[in-house]
Image: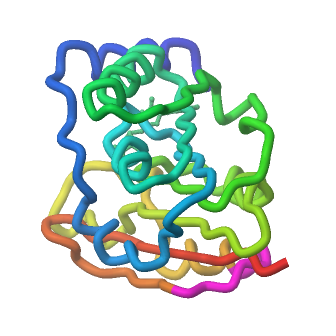
Amino acid sequence: MADGDAARWDAKYEGRPLPVVEPTAALQRVIRWLPARGGALDVAGGDGAQAVWMAQRGLDVALCDVSAVALRRAQALATRAGVDLQTHRLDLETDPLPAGRRAVVSCSNYLQPSLWPNAFERLEAGGVAIWIHPTITNLERNAKPSRRWLLEPGQGRRIFEEAGLMVVHAEESWVGARHLCVLVGRRDG
Ligand SMILES: C[S@@+](CC[C@H](N)C(=O)[O-])C[C@H]1O[C@@H](n2cnc3c(N)ncnc32)[C@H](O)[C@@H]1O
């Protein structure tokens, strides 16, 4: 990533109140696909709202992100919630994902399509990938994120299918104020 990007994210997270631990409206739509136990990896998981929520549900969760401040806050959130959380500081543009296969790999609001197939490789057989990201339709009501950070129609599903995942949930719709692509794919082999 460009020099200064990690610092920019650190500055965004610094000083904010800790997030509320609850599933987003988009995540609520796919809760039924979340296994009750096993390992989970939340990619670019930020300050941990989704990761800590998954840990509260009984998963053994790791979160990776480039922002040291976000990771510190995620640990504080996990401590406050009384759950364990592993954190890994890494640059997803250059560093490998944490080793090991997991029952869940998730990613919300971080767009790096080249990363998806590598992330899916971290799924054990029967494991599920859960991806949530705004599409270009989001620009009809929101100026940000700008177009380069948005999914084209059908793009997310295509990447899942080309990587060999069985798509079990795919929607592109307004979820509250944002137009989101919400995908769940299962690795069968
Ligand atoms: C919009 S936030 C999303 C955070 C969280 N997934 C959520 O939905 O609340 C994007 C996250 O990506 C992280 N990030 C940006 N570039 C990254 C990179 N190259 N490697 C790892 N993390 C990165 C940022 O630090 C930030 O936490």
| Quadrant in which the N terminus appears | top right
Labels in figure, total: 0
Q: Position of residue 62 (x, y in %)?
A: 57, 38
Question: Per the image, is 178 magenta?
Answer: no
**For residue 179, what is the image quadrant?**
bottom left
Q: Position of residue 39 (x, y in %)?
A: 62, 51
Q: Is residue 171 above or below residue 150?
A: below
Relative horizontal placement of residue 143, taking residue 9 as reference (left or right) = left
Q: Residue at x 27, y 58 (%)?
A: 23
Q: Residue at x 55, y 27 (%)?
A: 87
Q: Nearer the viewer, residue 84 or 111?
A: 84
Which residues lie in the magenta part? 161-168
State the colouring used for the structure image.
rainbow
Q: Is residue 138 above or below residue 165?
A: above
Q: Residue at x 14, y 69 (%)?
A: 176
Q: Is residue 50 above or below residue 154?
A: above
Q: Position of residue 154 (x, y in %)?
A: 53, 81
Q: Is residue 112 above or below residue 174?
A: above
Q: Position of residue 171 (x, y in %)?
A: 40, 84
Question: Per the image, is 166 magenta?
Answer: yes
| Quadrant in which the C terminus appears | bottom right
